[in-house]
Image (cartoon, rainbow, N blue to C red):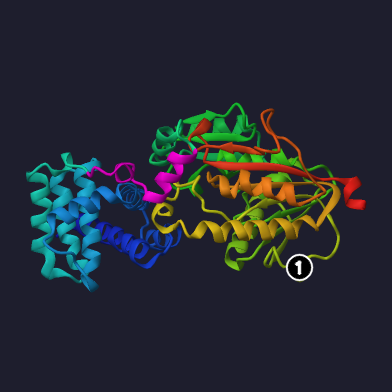
Amino acid sequence: MSQAQKQAAKLRADAALVLHAILEQGQSSRHCLSERQHAYAQSRDKAWLQQMVFGCLRHLPTLQFWIRSLLQKPLKGNKKVVEHLLMVGLYQLAFSRVSPHAAISETVNAVKLLRADSLRGLVNAVLRQFQRDKMHQTLPDNPAALAGMSNWIYQAIAEHYPADKDLILDASNRPAPLWLRVNQMQISRTDFAAALAAEKISVELSINHPQAVIVQGVGDITQLPGYDNGWFAVQDGAAQLAAHYLAPQAQERILDCCAAPGGKTSHLLEIAPTIDCVALDNDAQRLKRVEDNLNRLKHSATLLCADAALTDDWWDGIAFDRILLDAPCSATGVIRRHPDIRWLRKRTDIDTLVNVQATILRALWRCLKPGGTLLYATCSILPSENTQQVQRFLAETADAQLDPITDSETVEFPGRQILPGEEQMDGFYYARLIKSEALSKQ
């Protein structure tokens, strides 16, 4: 076997191991995929591994449907990972540009790397039967399965967005564009776009995002012009709206709550460099990412590792002028970036998340100055986490008032809901609240 064939087999084995970790052990793709990618020096290999894993997750019900048709009985125990290798092989044959010969032979070669050499013949036979019988033409008749969604997420989208259902599903199954936010304290957007164009990188400027560029065909972002000089940060267009909606002013004291990985923190500091910014997160490792990103972008903030709801543990009693709460949520608006969410997130998780959001919101409200602004944000498209959450808070909180972001907002339907794919953005929700000075003093 040549070195190239060995590398090809290793990529397929690693894709199977990542899928096994996600689907059988409940690990997030962010963790287990990046762990496997570290073993590869070439950005094209890292990208191929992600493409295979994400592709399999987007088409999981269909791949499982085919596997059930092709196997006499499910593989169990230590052999279960070979089913995930079969998914990789079937995905290549049905949905990728990999040649059928390479898809079959290199997937079969990967079996040995999974310490299941006795199943080489089975894997070879299954893939060849799939190709011979043109089984890619046979699809499940479940609409959720055809959409590549878990039943409960599909039903939630159909219930809450009947007119936009197909658009949401289509956007959630397409790879997300790469949005960059230009750090205009270091370089202008025009000059950064020119530097990218000089490297033959396709650049699109967003009309509604003054610091954004959208790029195509980029593998390793650390190789882009100005990465080490802090010229840009990776941040979706929807997330870039947070700093503008909060609108920090010079010298104000600002809290960015649930701040990791620090994109919104750094954006706040670029809009208003003289603010006293506190970035809070309850995960020490993720807070280290905030620190690293701030250092690269040449910004400075106070970092606190604590549970936001337990204000007695971290708050010094000095009220904040403005608070950004990017609340823990279902992440149903960013499924296109993290396709494992559709399988790892359960319907039963939502009530817990809604309670956590409400608890943090109530706790942070006491940390806000009378007359101050709190921006509530999630990357969810579920009303229970968004409009219904804010409706309930407004009803229960005498000194809370809605400060509309859009002209169509009302207390009954507060906030702006961005749907996946809208203006190329992720799904996101924002609601802006003001603490009434008169009522706060009573």
| Depth check, front residue: 237 or 102 | 237
Within-10-Å neighbours for mark 1: few <14, some 14–19, many 20+:
some
Estimate the x, y position of residue 22 in percent, counting from the top left: 37, 61
| Quadrant including the N terminus | bottom left
Say if 37 sits above or below 322 in the image. below
Estimate the x, y position of residue 334 in percent, counting from the top left: 49, 46
Q: Is residue 242 visible?
A: yes
The quarter of the picture where residue 351 lies is bottom right
- Tell me what residue is drawn at x 41 percent, y 50 percent: 152
Q: Which residues are magenta?
A: 140-160
Estimate the x, y position of residue 27 in percent, counting from the top left: 41, 64
Say if 152 sits above or below 191 in the image. below
Say if 101 sits above or below 119 in the image. above
The reply to whether the magenta stretch includes residue 439 is: no
The reply to whether the magenta stretch includes residue 142 is: yes
Magenta segment's dominant SS is helix
Q: Which residue is mark 1?
A: 314
- Tell me what residue is drawn at x 38 percent, y 41 percent: 173
Is 219 on the left-hand or right-hand side of 92? right
- The secondary structure type at the circle numbered 1 is helix
Estimate the x, y position of residue 231 in percent, counting from the top left: 61, 43
Is 364 on the left-hand or right-hand side of 209? right
| Depth check, front residue: 110 or 264 | 264
Q: How many marks?
A: 1
Q: Is residue 185 visible?
A: no
Say if 5 sits above or below 98 in the image. below
Q: Tell me which amino acid carries mark 1.
A: Trp
